[in-house]
């Protein structure tokens, strides 16, 4: 297994999970770790970490869409019927009326379309799924691995087994994991096996049932692989349309004739002569590379009955690969985020975004500055997606992450033989791959001076030259650069080229530090909590929130996100207290007593977060108590729970107890014992009057 390589499968239903996981493990053969999740059983978004995420169907993708937002390593599997199970359906009489049962209307109709496309047009399939109001009174049900959903009155169930992942999706998986070249033969072999199984059934039934033969032949004609069969004498029994198209010999000239005479290079009788099958043989036919299987058929007495020959043109996989490579999504060269993904309402941020939107509408080079962790790459994504290049590649490069020599070859590419270890045929650089789109150069202040000169030529002439090449390549690429350094100072002391600095510094967007926009912290916390399924008002105690608001956040948004992830992990099922915060925050942040020792501090907090109504439960409690304490009677926790619910705030009695304890500690309410309840104090009314 390659270190760290992993694939996450998201399926629905344990049987589907096991079947698809088995198919992927069979394909990848331990080279990549496969982890499978059920959306309807113990699913956790924290497990969605892998090099590639494969979602079993489009409806499932919609179910988990909020957890996949912004990810480019996700593909939705295309599914097909497992041909090896079709013999179960072939046993039904023609013109059979049957319900097709699946977990959703959409997937049931999809399976019906697949079956009709395979030639089962004489059957009448009725889609049936959970929550269907009028269940048809039909005695036969066909289902792709969902027999538990079949209505109880059905007398006969035909279970075709779970739908499997089709060849185009498997090819894309191998391509994304950079395994296609070494697994191409294996991939073809997996799908040829399906044709082999159904061909065996056809050959073995040729003398038994003419209608069955006709339907089997129809199914085989839907297969993209070539399928032929001979009997023990070498006479051709089967020759499907894919074989007819490949060899350009009409079926009428082949069926009934000795195949060895017509296609001697295919050696169809070899298994009869050697008494063994010949599988996964890579061969060449008129400059076409094909993968051939010759399967020997025997009866129950070990007598030879014939041979099934299947073949697949390896170029078909290459065509799929080219199609996928033409799509920038395959390499992750896609901008994930838009301006809508940037969280914050502060004037400092809004001024920055307004300028960025203006620049996005142009084709200008943009420099994004700001402290580390402020979201410079996210803003670069947003600018690209708002530009006329949004459908073209977006290539991100961290100039500080690669050594000088490697950075040059990655950016500009190289020709074959340019240096020891250069890939045969050379390699296109990232600038070349970004052609037509945008390249984002992060940490550009760390780019070596020699490369800065070459980048300046790209900006001014729109030309590049691969390492070891003798010709210039013209490209059309927009450059967005970012840095957390002061480029003016670097240019002054000679660490950065002045001409490049002046070329980049024309259109600059400066992102503010999080410390300069504290009013955005609650919005960001709420945003980061979405993937954990937690509500902000039920996540943080007021003291913990106050500490977060007063912490200086030197790591900015990145640090805040990491803290929220940490707290959501260690405080499952309960609220975060001050003592739960990481040690740095407890030491540097303002303590609860300091934060709420006086009314103005508490008022400032409400001013900051009140607009978003995320953490205003304490304010609501004060309002309720003020309104209902007029008769001098206290209010119990159960009554407060009911009144808060009327305001759309759902709390348990324990949660209300926590907030009352906090308010009492600030002198804003007075809690009594037993049935005395809780009353608002004069200090509480004073604060409430100033706030409302």
Image (cartoon, rainbow, N blue to C red):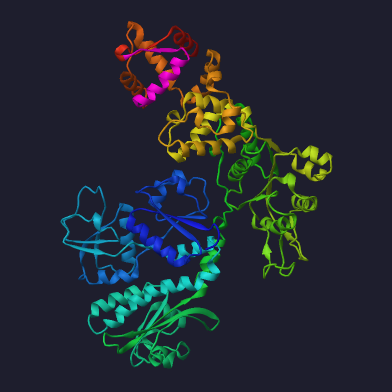
From the viewer's perspective, is 138 left or right of 9? left
Q: Residue at x 61, y 32 (%)?
A: 553
Give the residues drawn in magenta, as a range.
651-673
Q: Residue at x 71, y 69 (%)?
A: 416
From the viewer's perspective, is 106 left or right of 328? left
From the viewer's perspective, is 103 left or right of 464? left
- Number of numbered labels in the structure image: 0
Closer-to-camera residue (654/476): 654
Image position, residue 566 (x, y; %): 51, 38
Q: Is residue 6 magenta?
A: no
Compared to residue 585, the image places residue 359 above or below, namely: below
Image position, residue 650 (x, y; %): 36, 27
Closer-to-camera residue (479/537): 537
Residue 421 seen by the camera? yes
Closer-to-camera residue (658/216): 658
Residue 119 seen by the camera? no
Q: Is residue 662 magenta?
A: yes
Where on the picture, by quarter, is residue 166? bottom left
Q: Residue at x 73, y 70 (%)?
A: 417
Compared to residue 611, the image places residue 511 above or below, namely: below
Closer-to-camera residue (338/363): 338
Image position, residue 387 (x, y; %): 61, 44
Compared to residue 20, the image places residue 455 above or below, namely: above
Image position, residue 347 (x, y; %): 61, 27
From the viewer's perspective, is 78 left or right of 601? left
């Amino acid at each position: 297994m390659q270190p760290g390589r992993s694939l996450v499968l998201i399926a629905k239903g344990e049987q589907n999970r096991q079947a698809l996981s088995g198919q992927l493990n069979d394909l990848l053969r331990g080279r990549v770790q496969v982890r499978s999740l059920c959306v309807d059983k113990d699913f956790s978004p924290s497990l969605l970490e892998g090099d590639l995420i494969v979602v079993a169907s489009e409806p499932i993708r919609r179910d988990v869409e909020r957890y996949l937002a912004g990810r480019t390593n996700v593909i939705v599997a295309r599914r097909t019927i497992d041909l090896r199970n079709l013999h179960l359906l072939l046993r039904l009489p023609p013109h059979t009326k049957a319900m097709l049962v699946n977990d959703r209307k959409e997937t049931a109709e999809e399976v019906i379309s697949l079956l009709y496309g395979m030639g089962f047009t004489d059957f009448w399939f009725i889609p049936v799924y959970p929550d269907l109001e009028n269940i048809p009174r039909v005695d036969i049900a066909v289902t792709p691995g969902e027999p538990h959903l079949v209505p109880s009155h059905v007398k006969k169930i035909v279970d075709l087994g779970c739908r499997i992942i089709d060849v185009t999706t498997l090819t894309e998986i191998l391509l994304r994991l950079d395994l296609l070249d070494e697994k191409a033969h294996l991939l073809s072999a997996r799908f040829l096996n399906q044709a082999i199984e159904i061909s065996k059934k056809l050959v073995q039934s040729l003398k038994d049932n003419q209608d069955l033969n006709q339907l089997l032949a129809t199914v085989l004609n839907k297969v993209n692989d070539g399928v032929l069969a001979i009997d023990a004498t070498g006479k051709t029994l089967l020759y499907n349309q894919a074989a007819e198209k490949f060899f350009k010999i009409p079926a009428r000239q082949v069926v009934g004739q000795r195949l060895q005479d017509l296609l001697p290079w295919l050696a169809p009788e070899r298994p009869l002569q050697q008494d063994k099958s010949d599988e996964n043989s890579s061969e060449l036919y008129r400059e076409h590379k094909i993968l051939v299987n010759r399967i020997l058929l025997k009866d129950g007495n070990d007598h030879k009955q014939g041979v099934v020959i299947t073949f697949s043109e390896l170029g078909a996989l290459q065509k799929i690969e080219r199609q996928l490579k033409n799509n920038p999504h395959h390499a992750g060269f896609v901008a994930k985020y838009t301006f809508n993904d940037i969280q914050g309402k502060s004037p400092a941020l809004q001024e920055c975004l307004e300028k960025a939107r203006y620049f996005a509408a142009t084709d200008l080079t943009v420099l994004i500055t700001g402290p580390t962790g402020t979201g410079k790459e996210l803003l670069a994504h947003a600018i690209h997606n708002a530009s006329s290049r949004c459908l073209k590649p977006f290539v991100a490069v961290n100039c500080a992450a690669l050594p000088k020599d490697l950075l040059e070859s990655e950016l500009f590419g190289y020709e074959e033989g340019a240096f020891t270890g250069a890939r045969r045929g050379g390699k296109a650089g990232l600038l070349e791959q970004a052609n037509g789109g945008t390249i984002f150069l992060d940490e550009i202040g760390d780019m070596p001076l020699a490369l800065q000169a070459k980048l300046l030529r790209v900006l001014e002439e729109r030309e590049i030259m691969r390492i070891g090449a003798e010709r210039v390549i013209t490209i059309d690429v927009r450059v967005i650069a970012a840095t957390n350094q002061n480029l003016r100072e670097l240019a002054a002391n000679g660490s950065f080229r002045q001409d490049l600095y002046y070329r980049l510094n024309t259109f600059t967007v400066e992102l503010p530090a999080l410390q300069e926009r504290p009013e955005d912290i609650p919005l960001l916390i709420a945003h980061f909590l979405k993937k954990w399924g937690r509500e902000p008002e039920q996540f943080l105690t007021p003291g913990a929130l106050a500490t977060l608001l007063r912490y200086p956040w030197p790591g900015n948004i990145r640090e805040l996100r990491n803290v929220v992830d940490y707290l959501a992990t260690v405080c499952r099922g309960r609220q975060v207290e001050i003592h739960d915060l990481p040690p740095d925050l407890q030491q540097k942040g303002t303590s609860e007593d300091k934060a709420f020792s006086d009314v103005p501090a508490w008022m400032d907090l409400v001013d900051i977060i009140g607009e978003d109504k995320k953490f205003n439960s304490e304010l609501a409690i004060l309002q309720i108590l003020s309104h209902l304490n007029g008769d001098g009677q206290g209010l119990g926790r159960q009554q407060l729970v009911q009144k808060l619910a009327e305001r759309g705030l759902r709390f348990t009695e324990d949660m209300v107890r926590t907030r009352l304890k906090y308010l009492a500690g600030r002198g804003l309410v007075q809690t009594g014992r037993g049935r005395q309840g809780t009353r608002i104090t004069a200090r509480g009314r004073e604060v409430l009057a100033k706030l409302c």
